[in-house]
Structure formats: C-alpha cells, structure tokens
Image: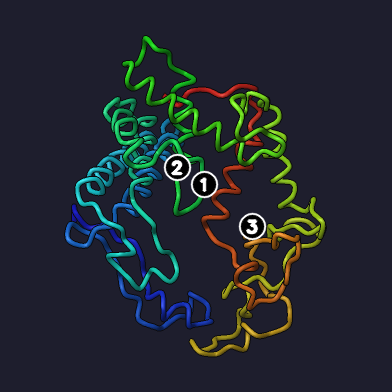
Amino acid sequence: MKYYFLLKVGDPVVDHGCWERPETMTETRPLLYINKTSPGSDVAGETAATFAAASLVFKSTDATYSSTLLTHSEQLFNFADSNRGIYSETFPDIQLYYKSTGYEDELLWAASWLYHATGNSTYLRYAVENGAKFSGYGDPSYFGWDDKRAGIQVLLSRVHFFSNSTSLSNDIYDGLLNYMDTAEGVMCVIIPDTPVSTTDRTKNASPNDMRNFATSQAEYILGNNPLNMSYLVGFGTKYPQQVHHRGASIPADENPSCTDRTWLMSSNPNPNIAIGALVGGPSQTDTYDDVRTNALQGEPTTYSSALFTGLLTGLASTSPTVTSFT
C-alpha cells in the first residue's frame, strides 16, 4: 500500500442527494484513492504539508508521533512530485464540488513546511527553484483551499527574516526575497488604506496595523458586524439557527431515509446546536438569510473553521515577537 493514498469515503453525488445523519446512513460508501496511475498531487501535497506542520506541533510533547508524521509527510511529497496530476481530473465526479485548478501550489506548500520541519535545504531549494515556474511568487492572491500561494509567500518570508545573506546561498536568498516581495503585495491587497501600486507598499503599515486588522476580522465574525450576529455557531447570544448541517437539523430520535426532506425543509431551528461550526457568512452587503436551504451562506466547512482556528491561535499568542520554526 506504499503508493496508495485514500482521499475520500462516499459518493459525492449520492451523498449530497441525501439528507440524513451520517451515523445512520446505509448507502454504499465507496472508497476513493490515488496511486501512480490515478494521480492527485494536489491532495497528496496538501496532506504532506499538513503532516509536516503537525510534526512541529507534537515535536516537544510526543516525539514518536511527530517522527511518524514527518516520515509520512516526506513519503507523500515524493509520491506527489513523482506522479503529477490533478485529483479532480483523475476523478471528474468531484469537479462539481471541489474542482482543483492545479497541484503546483500544493507542492510548494509541502516543500515549504517540510523545510521548516526538517531544516533540510533540499526542500527550500525546491521551493525557490520552482517559485517562478509554479507561480509561487509574483502574483499576490488570497489564501484558500484551492490556492496556497499566499500562505507559501508568507511562510517563506519568515525564512528570509530569520536568515542572512551569509547563511544561505545567493540564489536561495534572492529567491526568498521574491517570495517576501509578493507577500507584501498580499498584505497591501488585504489591509485597508494601504498603497497597492506604490514602491512603499506595506512599509506604510506597521505590525500593529496588521494585527489590528486581523483582530477586526475575528471580532466581525464573532458579532461586531451590522447584524450584531456571531457567525460562529454557539458563540454569543445571537447566531444562525438553521445551519445547513444534516446532523444538527435532525432530532436524535428520528431516522429519516435518504430522500426524506422533512428536516431540510423544516422552518424550526436546528434541534442540535453545531457548536463551533463556522458558517459561510454574510453577503457583500452584510445580509444573512438564515434558512437551512441556503447552503451558500449557512453551510459550515472544515476549511473555513481551520482558517478561523489559525486566526484565533495567532491572536491568542502572548509572545511579543515571532520566532523561527527551524
């Protein structure tokens, strides 16, 4: 099983057509996996990055587990890089739900985290040498599940900050500078009132400006917004009541069939509170339609919750300075 990676359990078309609790599903649950002949470099690369980052978290508390994560991270990275392909092209049925636009950013993302986790300069050189070819730098973008470039740019900027021109070869140092320049562009796009097109760029924005902006985004999500509503379910006194969530919407003593829409269409609040779920959020005009069928605004996702968890973790830090991972 060395060259297999299980990426999904279930059928996306069938599963989305059912409105029942996952605990009581009786439909067929097919397994989907990538291998050498059915590649998915984006999925394998993203998982490699996750394992490498997690290995740093557990390094001081569970060295054995940390080592296991790192071993599998390196295996997955090599597998992804050696057998390149986009998983949603390998499995077209997925395209309707999570279509991937490429795997290059995930390879750079994995290499960047592996360098931080191992200190092995081979991974750093991979990220630098492939930066232009894989569009890793030079194009400010938003961080998301399908585009890791902004994360790569910020992560590798740390290496430039904590290094100097004598500790790294000239080509590596200059390549990291390209990443840092693009990371500044990302900040300029996001932070209000920053000059995007001037040479000063984020030099006009202090670290406090960036942290204050991050704080304002967290506070907005938690209720400091025009609706005075928390978009984190269970937080505060006002939050979405009809979250688009099967388990939350169906009473514990009910066992509906796959095609039963009783609880999807119910006008009552969810009987089970999905505490900690982050919904899709408001429209651009700060409106929110709290109706269970409004999946665009009311569906909680793991990728949204993960980003918000990262934001809260950063804001909860009491350290006045950043430190190097390596």
Q: Quadrant of residue 175?
A: top left
Image location (x, y in percent) of residue 144: 50, 51
Label 2 SS = helix
Looking at the picture, does residue 319 appear above or below residue 82?
Answer: above
Q: Amino acid at mark 3?
A: Gly
Left or right relative to 78: residue 226:
right
Closer to us: mark 3 or mark 1? Answer: 1
Left or right relative to 295: residue 98:
left
Q: Quadrant of residue 202?
A: top right
Give the label on residue 159, or none: none
Give me the residue at 63% from left, 58% from top.
Answer: 278
Give the label on residue 149, or none: 2
Count numbered badges in the picture.
3
Q: Amino acid at mark 2?
A: Arg
Residue named by callout 3:
276
Give me the residue at 44% from left, 37% from top.
Answer: 152
Looking at the picture, does residue 263 appear above or below residue 164?
Answer: below
Label 3 SS = loop
Residue named by callout 1:
143
